[in-house]
Image (cartoon, rainbow, N blue to C red):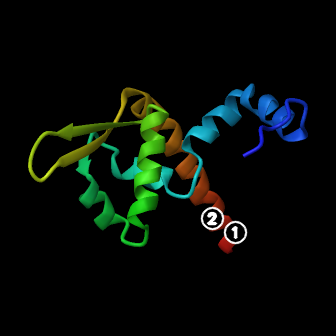
Amino acid sequence: MAARKQNSTYTRNETSLSECDLSYAINKIGGRWKLQILSMLNDNKTLRFTELKKEFSFITERMLSLQLRALEQDGLVKRTVYAEVPPRVEYELTEMALELWPILNQLSSWGGKQRKRASL
C-alpha cells in the first residue's frame, strides 16, 4: 500500500479534525455499535463476550470483537482474561467511560425529545 502524501487534502483534514476536542471525543464513541456496547456495560456491569453477543444477536461476532477491541484501545472498556478452560473473558467500563456516562445520558435525553418532535 502506498504512503499517503503529507500535503494531501485528506491528511490536512485529518490533522485539523484531530485538533478539535469535540471531534476527538466523537471519534472515540463513534461507530454503529460502540454506544450500544457502552450502554450494556453501564452500571458497573461486567459481561462476558457471549452475554454481549446474546444482547446483540443481530451483530456478527467479528464486528462485536472489532468494536470491543476499539473501545479497549481507546481506554473505554477493560478486558480481563482468566486462565481457565474454557477461556473466560470479561468486559467492563473503565473510569474514563464512567466519567463520560452523564454526558451520554444528556445526549440520550436530547435524542429522545428530538425523535418525538420529528414523529409529530
Tell me the kind of residue under disc 1: Ala
Q: Nearer the viewer, residue 10 or 78?
A: 10
Q: Is residue 113 left or right of residue 44?
A: right
Residue type (three-letter) at the residue carrying disc 2:
Arg
Q: Is residue 31 above or below residue 27?
A: below
* Rendering coords of residue 93 (x, y %): 35, 37
Judged left or right of residue 76, residue 51 is left
Residue at 48%, 43% in the rendered image: 70
Residue 8 location, quadrant: top right
Q: Residue at x 40, y 53 (%)?
A: 65
Q: Are marks 2 and 1 in contact (CB under 8 Å)?
A: yes
- Regarding mark 2 in the picture, which secondary structure is present there? helix
Q: Could you tell whether 114 is left or right of 72 in the image? A: right
Number of numbered discs on residues: 2
Whole-percent x and y of residue 91?
A: 29, 43
Mark 2, other Cα within 10 Å: few <14 / some 14–19 / many ≥20: few
Residue 105's x, y, as percent?
Answer: 49, 44
Depth check, front residue: 72 or 8: 8
Front-most of 8 and 54?
Answer: 8
**Above-or-below relation of 120 to 86:** below
Q: For the residues marked 2 and 1, what is the alpha-carbon distance in whole angstroms?
A: 5 Å
Secondary structure found at label 1: helix
Residue 77, by quadrant, is top left
The image position of residue 47, as x and y in percent, is 25, 49
Q: Quadrant of the C terminus?
A: bottom right
Image mark for residue 26: none
Q: Nearer the viewer, residue 110 or 4?
A: 4
Residue beneath the point at 36% across and 71% down: 57
The residue that label 1 is drawn on is 118
Write down the residue under mark 2.
115
| Residue 79 image-quadrant placement | top left
Residue pictured at 63% horizontal, 64% vertical? 115
